[in-house]
Image (cartoon, coloured by chain):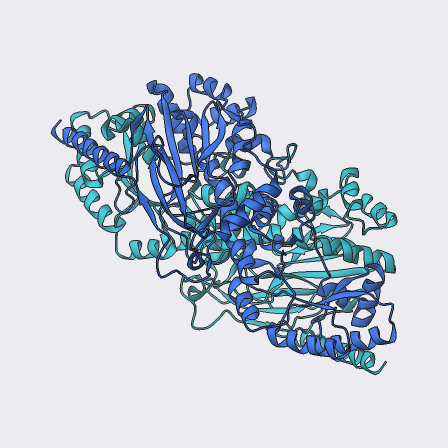
Chain colours: A cyan, B blue
Amino acid sequence: MKDQPLIPGEQDLSLMVDLYELAMAQAYWHAGMDRDAVFSLFFRKLPDHRNFVLACGQQHLARVIESLRFSDDHIKRLEELDQFSSGFLDWLRDFRFSGTVRAVPEGTPVFPQEPLLEVCAPVAEAQILESLVMNYVHLESTLASKAVRLVHAADGRPVVDFGMRRMHGLDSAWRGVRAYRLAGLAGTSNVLAGGDFGLPIKGTMAHSFIQACEDEMKAFRLYAELYPGTILLVDTYDTRTAVGNIIRWMKENPDVDIGGIRLDSGDLGEEARDCRAMLDEAGFKDIKVMASGGLDEYEIQELVASGAPIDGFGVGTAIGAAKDSPAIELAFKLTAYDGEPRMKKSTGKTSWPCPKQVFRRYDDTGRMAGDIITLEEETAEGDPLLKPLMENGALVEGAIAPLEDQVEHARRAFGSLPDRIQSLEEPDEPYPVSFSDRLTEAQKQTLSRIERIQEENRKK
Amino acid sequence: MKDQPLIPGEQDLSLMVDLYELAMAQAYWHAGMDRDAVFSLFFRKLPDHRNFVLACGQQHLARVIESLRFSDDHIKRLEELDQFSSGFLDWLRDFRFSGTVRAVPEGTPVFPQEPLLEVCAPVAEAQILESLVMNYVHLESTLASKAVRLVHAADGRPVVDFGMRRMHGLDSAWRGVRAYRLAGLAGTSNVLAGGDFGLPIKGTMAHSFIQACEDEMKAFRLYAELYPGTILLVDTYDTRTAVGNIIRWMKENPDVDIGGIRLDSGDLGEEARDCRAMLDEAGFKDIKVMASGGLDEYEIQELVASGAPIDGFGVGTAIGAAKDSPAIELAFKLTAYDGEPRMKKSTGKTSWPCPKQVFRRYDDTGRMAGDIITLEEETAEGDPLLKPLMENGALVEGAIAPLEDQVEHARRAFGSLPDRIQSLEEPDEPYPVSFSDRLTEAQKQTLSRIERIQEENRKK
């Protein structure tokens, strides 16, 4: 325990693997099954309270896959589990991903059964990626899919991430900020991640600062002197009293430079209206009113709709833990082996075989009109969504666009969703996704073949 | 972007800070406010679907706090934000936590308003820990509080963590496993974390393995040969057909060594009953039946109550993302500065001043009978929960017990909860927590003093 790291290091990502992946990889190796497999990443139904999933995280994943190595130390740890042969461990020691990854661009809205990402590689290679693929894409897609709803609800007003404290660990708190930027958030309180992912770093003050000073006005004076244009937190003791005191102080000291006030409790709409009225009446029309305190997209939408004079929102728990829907039931399923279609047919979990493509059609106004899922080699009307991300185990040149371009892609993609899908409410009619005739036929034939084999086993 | 790490490194934990913490620290430094502050970590109300929170993560946190340093690179990044003076940045460069941390032992059930942890240190030092304190304790407490419910529901049957793929990032997937061990899980599929935290590493096979072989029996034969005693996944095509084929195969080949079968879809109770009957009838009474597939504690409790012949459970999404309650509204609040009580009184968020202690009483049968929250220096009937974890900035010797002892502590602590609090349902009567007279009086006096100061500001 003593020498354990504080958080897992990137050199150990190859051991972030479910034991069964290594066990299956050894079984493939042992059986000489070394042909290419295609695994498809998708979900069968939308998460609760989501009309689409914003795909995110594929690029981090590609960088992880490219770098994955089993060190001598890893091999030693696996040896100690006493279930791997030295031949297989030698294979792991030489492991370099050699396959292909195709994925939809980051910030693309996707729907049930649509592959967000497909891996094609020798089966054992592709198999041991399973948990990493899901963990990486799951986190960022979960957070981006939540954050984009808050941005939509705020209807143009800036939304800032205050979620670090409630996010699940440090990796989530860090990568989450990239997902938030992609989803259109205007800033983050997270210093490390804001810098790393180019999202403006924002911050005001906490109740503790006012409590430490005890005298609220002393705290405000200290802060305003040090940080011209700062935003003062006014609800530590009593919001209206605080705002009244600030107004008197500003009137007596015209040099005081305050950018805004922040409300963090109570009925935010009512408090905002009262504070705005007090500020306006005193002639401080430029002082902004910001709100925070347990906000989610529904409350923000309601505040905006009610005309509450709030200029921006800080959001913590709702986006940090994607509280109303913290998980997407992503699956990473084998769809082909050695060029032959593969599927399962477990109760309630029927799947679609074969490597695929998704074509997205748009109407005359540029809104998304419907998707069709086809075999990879088919073409159909619309734009193909899956694009090469890795080939021969290496990142495809140009596959990783500058982050600002990806942010713009995500913004346009969200804007092109039908209104009912953008909405926070469940749509009357889901977004139309169909399957090509050839894919449907492939599913039918694969099912028949499976049933024939099962029947033969019964007769043996 | 190119040189960015794949996950944040532990050397960068000091920048995992909300900007306002650094801004406030600079304001304290600037104002010469360098006296000791006490910050208390607690929650105001229980998370949804939880009757208690199992405190977890304090020890990781203590190790993080002990190691926290601002490197030249960090200082340079902060300089670029253009709001910190060189004097304050020098203070940060020399930063070493010098204070005291008291915390409840890991695996202690805690209730609203009870401090899980208190930090006493020069105010700026304590302030910049805020987000790290919350992020560390939040994650592990959230996951442990969920996992302990699954263990309870399984009523003695082993529960194994299959959650890595749905957990929020790699740090969560790793540290979560320690929380799961503390909560009483029997194993994990996560190779790295299982090894690091001494939780047995478990794994069977995935649908992909069967799909790749296409012929299910071929897959079973391959696996059983390589892994004697293995558990076969039987629902890829049709559960009863698969079990029938396995039975015929075992009858014809008495050397075949299978430990169990795993059901992953469909009506698990019904499938388990049918499979158990088929196996028993064929004389394979020792073959275990395991279940997985979107299980949560309510379904496990129902399966157990219905007498479904299931010998163990694998759980993924429910524990991985603590799906029904992924966040605890932890607060890290200033309760004293320079020996004087401090509090806020925001609408709906009234808090309690002063450093505290919690005393827990037990009844004659060893069950927890009630807690009282007191001033730190008070004594009361019962056992004091908060114990020194760090002193003078260093871990207290012996404060970190061997993990197996902590697991045992957590097991006993859960067992000593009243039945209605252990239950998955909301209790008729909440667990009794009271406040000492002296604490109540301190709150009253602090409120009066705040009101007096606010009033004076109004008159100025």
**In-image side of A29 versus B186 (left or right):** right
**In-image side of B443 versus A169 (left or right):** left
Task: Give x and y (percent) for residue A385.
Answer: 61, 60
Q: Report the residue that reaches farthest toward the left.
A: B459
User: Can the viewer see residue A248 in this picture?
Assistant: no
- Quarter that holds the N terminus of chain A: top right
- Considering depth in this image, is A273 or A85 the residue closer to the camera? A85
Figure check: B41 above or below A92: above
Task: Give x and y (percent) for residue B196.
Answer: 67, 42
Task: Give x and y (percent) for residue B23.
Answer: 39, 28
Number of numbered discs visible in the structure rendering = 0
Figure check: B338 above or below B302: above
Please tell me which residue is depicted at 34% across the width and 20% down the height of the picture.
B33
User: Can the viewer see residue A458 in this picture?
Assistant: yes
Q: Report the residue that reaches farthest toward the front.
A: B364
- Quarter that holds the C terminus of chain A: bottom right
Snapshot quadrant of residue B386? top left
Figure check: A17 above or below B352: below
**In-image side of A35 versus A419 (left or right):** right
Task: Give x and y (percent) for residue B359.
Answer: 39, 40
